[in-house]
Image (spheres, rainbow, N blue to C red):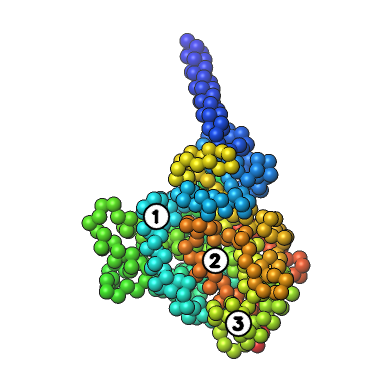
Amino acid sequence: MTMINLNNVTCGLVGLATFTLVLFYIKYAWKKRIMPPGPLPVPILGNVLQLYSKGLIPYVLKMAEKYGPVYTLYFGSRPTVIVTGYQTVKEVLVDLGDTFLDRGTIPVFERFYDKRGLPLSNGESWKQLRQFSLITLKDFGMGRKTLEEPMQEEAHHLVEYFRNTKGQPVNPSTIFSCASSNIISSILVGKRYDYADEKWMKILQDMRDSFELISSPWGQLYDAIPHILKYLPGPHRRIFPLLLNLKEIVKDSVSSHQETLDPTCPRDYIDCFLIRMEQETLDPKTCFEKTNLISTVFDMFLGGAETTSVTINFGVLNLIKYPDVQEKLHEEIDHVIGHAREPKVEDRNQMPYMNAVIHEIQRISDAIPMGCIRSTTRDVNLHGYRIPKGTDVLPVLTTVLRDSSQFETPEVFNIKHFLDENGKFKKNNGFMPFAAGKRACIAESLVRMELFIFFTTLLQKFTLKSSEDPKELNIAPTERGIENIPPTHEVIFIPRQ
């Protein structure tokens, strides 16, 4: 009798599994009629096994070769339309920008931000938060000459720090993170952190470690099947604890601002947000509330410190690997600025070579290779395929920055991508490190100023070298996922005067 019951249970489970499998593929076949083509997914996991075995970016690029610039991958049970190449990404982000304006599903960041704040908002809430943030950041100097002085001051601190290394090799990664974080911190919370602040430096290192995990295969697995991975052991479980201290600092800063707020004299972004909160306290639909504030400031810290410092780190490594480029930069700096006065943002107009080098550094470093996922605001036809409203769409930025139709040698560091035959700076349509359209990076103008001041000041004062032969220096990313992670190398800062 027991054996008969066991057989019945087994048959029932097999029947349920078969029914679920058939139902999955019927649903998949129905969607496949209108959705872009793509590799066959499996139930629950989707295309995760291929992504994990081959790596996210290599697999995405390989599928683009097979299926073309528009195709579908399944991140778990979640269908995502992948968009590659300059022409198609431009079509999605710019030409049809309003149709692809919503933020798509990003499980790892949804957990970071409690599904709130500027980076994850959509619709009217996103419009209000973005407009408020743009105006407020500009009021506190973003993209304007008023922010030049804090950048020059921070560059001065960098020079003093590296001068005190007395020509000894040093890993500058966390110092660059701190310098970058101080620029955005001056706007958000009106504070600068010292390089000797061990607690803050530990928080920045934890942030870098977290992003390395997010970009690893384990982090990519979590983003694809979070409902499974959150219950399983593995390195991905360290992603979130590593960022808790930064989030607590943001929360404490908001609380401190609330206690000392003077509505007639706002000191920074947080003060301005709190004042707006007070003004709209009786509006039940307002997006100006504390959780949105914390998540927005948290995101700006992550972007301002991490992404910019990644670009600076890759930039320094490229300048060491190509000493002839560094030599030409020294010549241009000496000619335009000299050794005595501090570099100014207005010098950029007279320094086409420096401008081209920074653009090429941003292109080749490719800090956020996968870009940020979008979602369709309505049904849309793209390249002959019907994409339903609410479908996740991923414009892959690395395929724009390395598009051979826009760049002569896309895989090679080449200053000529941004210089014409007369040595003048030239724009390139494929330059999209900040994405494009209405949802492009809100801090683009700040980052551009920051990179110019930091690189120009460092090269005015130092020659950058490594104990390794430049030709043997491996500067390939150690991880390529949501972020490109630069390799760890010690740098020698040799004073020029």
Q: Residues within 10 Å of mark 3 (few under 14, many from 20)?
A: some
Q: CA distance from mark 1 to mark 2?
A: 24 Å
Q: Secondary structure at mark 3?
A: helix
Q: Residue furthest bottom?
A: 340
Asked whether disc 3 touches disc 2, contact meaning CB atoms under 8 Å apart, the reply is: no
User: Is 387 placed above or below 242 here?
Assistant: above
Q: Is residue 414 visible?
A: yes
Q: Residues within 10 Å of mark 2 (few under 14, many from 20)?
A: many
Report the residue marked by disc 1. 126
Relative image position of residue 110 (x, y in whole percent): 44, 50
- Amino acid at the residue labelled 3: Arg
Q: Secondary structure at mark 1?
A: helix
**Residue plotted at (38% across, 59% down):** 129
Report the residue marked by disc 2. 308
Front disc: 3 or 1: 1
Q: CA distance from mark 3 to mark 2?
A: 22 Å
**Residue plotted at (56% across, 38% down):** 385
Label 3 or label 2, whichever comes before in sequence order = 3
